[in-house]
């Protein structure tokens, strides 16, 4: 079974190599976004700091968030949407593999490609231009990798969940905009949750979006102690479980409704 | 093509979109949520730091809305036709625009007018009007006329950017990535350009004059003591129509050179 998943991931990886020219574009886009954010933080913080956060910290924070956002899988919604509209979903359903896992390993191939050809070059270039600090504690690196896996899982399940909801509403685009809006605010990818007021912080803590940006960055920067990290990993795992159960429920209902139009 | 015929096309497009009223409204709500999130993040940011380089929340809201509003107006006319031009050429569908007794440019634009930007216009106009009531800028009749002209000029300039890239489809056939770069560059003017270094400010003023869309008009309206900005404020009113005329010429040049994609 693992061999089949490995093959799916490899295939997705090599499919990406057909669009190599887009790699430069993504790197350029990432560097621009990081540059804009750093300019804003430089204007805001100058040489001082707020809540113990200075400009060097914000450079690392912006860069980590730009990188993590390249790895998120919530765009899986468009894959499902396209397969539903074209009817190609049938050939996937015929395969003796669980459909969500097929999708997940397919997306994983994209992510591996992104890491190798976008994230690593972006970090390298940004390190040359802006400077960038690396974690020193080995346990920080382990915790960071775990938080990345949680980010992958939550973003995948969110995208998959919206795709399933659009079985009923058939308005993928609008739903994706709404989730993207929630991610913009509550993932903390631009404005870290440190700078949220108490009530906004409370809302952010109740939602799963902080795992898609803020949590990995805060762990990477060593801004969370061991007990906080453990708490976050537990909370993230519970979110994965909740989202997974929700997708299972919707899937079993959606599959009964599925009528592929035309033959 | 006269204005009556153009508006007749637009009416037909609106009618056909309203066939699916539910989907249209859900889409509009999605887009408004998306932009509301962007405003919310900036608002949350400025709860901590009162100003970015001396720009308060209401001033940033004005600057930001001016960009979205002019983009939405310009893009209503040009986004869909220009982004789909490469595919239209490749599919060989462009010929039908050349064989009508109408200007291919206006006929092509009228045919692909996009009413979907109405949601962008609603939210940005509301925030713009709200920010005007909040910012103390000593309104005079001249300033009011200036604002209207600045919105028109900015819309033309945004449209010109899209038309220039669209024109390149005639030469390169595939230009999607150039649009992506254009949208990344536009991110730079979401904030006052004074947060960037001198070189980048010069580029955004003289080479890719995106700052003429919102930065210089805002400066002109907020602060009338600085003479150079006043000159650039007036330049901002001229550059839009001028840029659009030049982009139109470039497009027509490309359309005349057009030989079909073979096949």
Image (tube, rainbow, N blue to C red):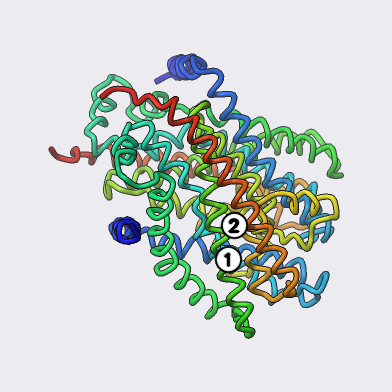
Q: Residue at x 77, y 70 (%)?
A: A45
Asked if marks 2 and 1 fall on the same chain, the answer is: yes
> Residue A38: which quarter of the image?
bottom right
Please identify the residue farthest to the left as the structure is shown: B263
| Residue B127 in which image quadrant | top right
What is the quadrant of the N terminus of chain A in the image? Answer: bottom left
Relative to A176, residue A117 above or below: below
Which is closer to the viewer, label 2 or label 1?
2
Q: Look at the image and tell me in which quarter the C terminus of chain A lies.
A: top left
Any part of residue A27 in sight: yes
Image vertical order of residue A164 relative to residue A158, above or below: above
To which residue does mark 2 refer?
A: B188
Left or right: B57 as drawn, with respect to B123? right
Please state which of residues A183 and B199 is positioned toward the viewer in this rendering. Answer: A183
At a point 84% along the width and 58% down the height, the residue shown is: B50
Q: Chain of mark 2?
A: B
Sequence-first disc among 2 and 1 = 2
Q: Which residue is mark 1?
A: B200
In this rendering, is residue B8 above or below B53? Answer: above
């Amino acid at each position: 079974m693992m061999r089949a998943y490995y093959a799916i991931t490899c295939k997705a990886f090599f499919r990406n190599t057909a669009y190599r020219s887009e790699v430069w574009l993504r790197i350029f886009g990432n560097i621009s976004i990081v540059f804009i954010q750093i300019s804003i933080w430089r204007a805001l913080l100058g040489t001082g700091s707020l809540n113990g956060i200075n400009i060097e910290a914000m450079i690392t924070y912006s860069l980590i968030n730009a990188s993590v956002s390249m790895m998120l899988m919530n765009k899986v919604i468009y894959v499902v949407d396209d397969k539903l509209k074209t009817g190609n979903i049938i050939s996937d359903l015929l395969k003796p593999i669980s459909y969500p896992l097929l999708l997940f390993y397919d997306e994983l191939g994209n992510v591996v490609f992104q890491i190798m050809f976008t994230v690593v070059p972006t970090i390298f270039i940004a390190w040359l231009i802006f400077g960038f600090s690396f974690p020193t504690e080995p346990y920080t690196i382990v915790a960071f990798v775990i938080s990345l896996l949680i980010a992958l899982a939550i973003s995948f399940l969110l995208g998959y969940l919206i795709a399933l909801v659009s079985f009923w509403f058939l308005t993928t685009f609008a739903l994706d905009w709404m989730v993207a809006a929630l991610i913009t605010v509550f993932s903390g990818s631009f404005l870290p949750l440190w700078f949220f007021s108490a009530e906004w912080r409370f809302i952010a803590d109740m939602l799963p979006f902080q795992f898609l940006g803020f949590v990995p960055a805060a762990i990477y920067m060593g801004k969370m102690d061991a007990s906080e990290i453990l708490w976050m990993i537990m909370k993230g795992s519970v979110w994965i479980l909740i989202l997974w159960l929700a997708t299972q429920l919707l899937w079993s209902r959606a599959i009964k409704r599925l009528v592929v139009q035309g033959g | 093509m006269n204005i009556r015929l153009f508006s007749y096309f637009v009416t037909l497009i609106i009618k056909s979109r309203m066939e699916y009223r539910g989907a249209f409204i859900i889409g509009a709500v999605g887009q408004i949520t998306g932009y509301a999130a962007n405003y919310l993040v900036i608002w949350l940011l400025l709860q901590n730091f009162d100003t970015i380089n001396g720009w308060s929340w209401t001033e940033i809201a004005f600057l930001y809305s001016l960009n979205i509003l002019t983009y939405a107006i310009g893009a209503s006319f040009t986004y869909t036709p220009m982004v789909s031009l490469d595919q239209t050429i490749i599919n060989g569908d462009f010929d039908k625009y050349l064989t009508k007794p109408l200007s291919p440019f206006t006929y092509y634009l009228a045919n692909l007018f996009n009413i979907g930007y109405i949601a962008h216009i609603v939210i940005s106009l509301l925030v713009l009007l709200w920010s005007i009531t909040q910012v103390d800028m000593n309104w005079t009749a001249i300033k009011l006329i200036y604002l209207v002209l600045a919105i028109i000029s900015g819309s033309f300039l945004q449209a010109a950017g899209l038309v220039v890239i669209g024109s390149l489809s005639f030469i390169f056939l595939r230009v999607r990535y150039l649009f992506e770069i254009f949208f990344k560059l536009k991110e730079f003017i979401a904030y006052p350009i004074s947060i960037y270094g001198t070189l980048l400010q010069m580029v955004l003023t003289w080479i890719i004059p995106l700052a003429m869309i919102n930065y210089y008009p805002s400066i002109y309206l907020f602060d009338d003591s600085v003479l150079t900005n006043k000159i650039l404020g007036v330049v901002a009113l001229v550059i839009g129509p001028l840029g659009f005329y030049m982009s139109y010429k470039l497009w027509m040049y490309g359309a005349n050179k057009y030989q079909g994609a073979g096949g």
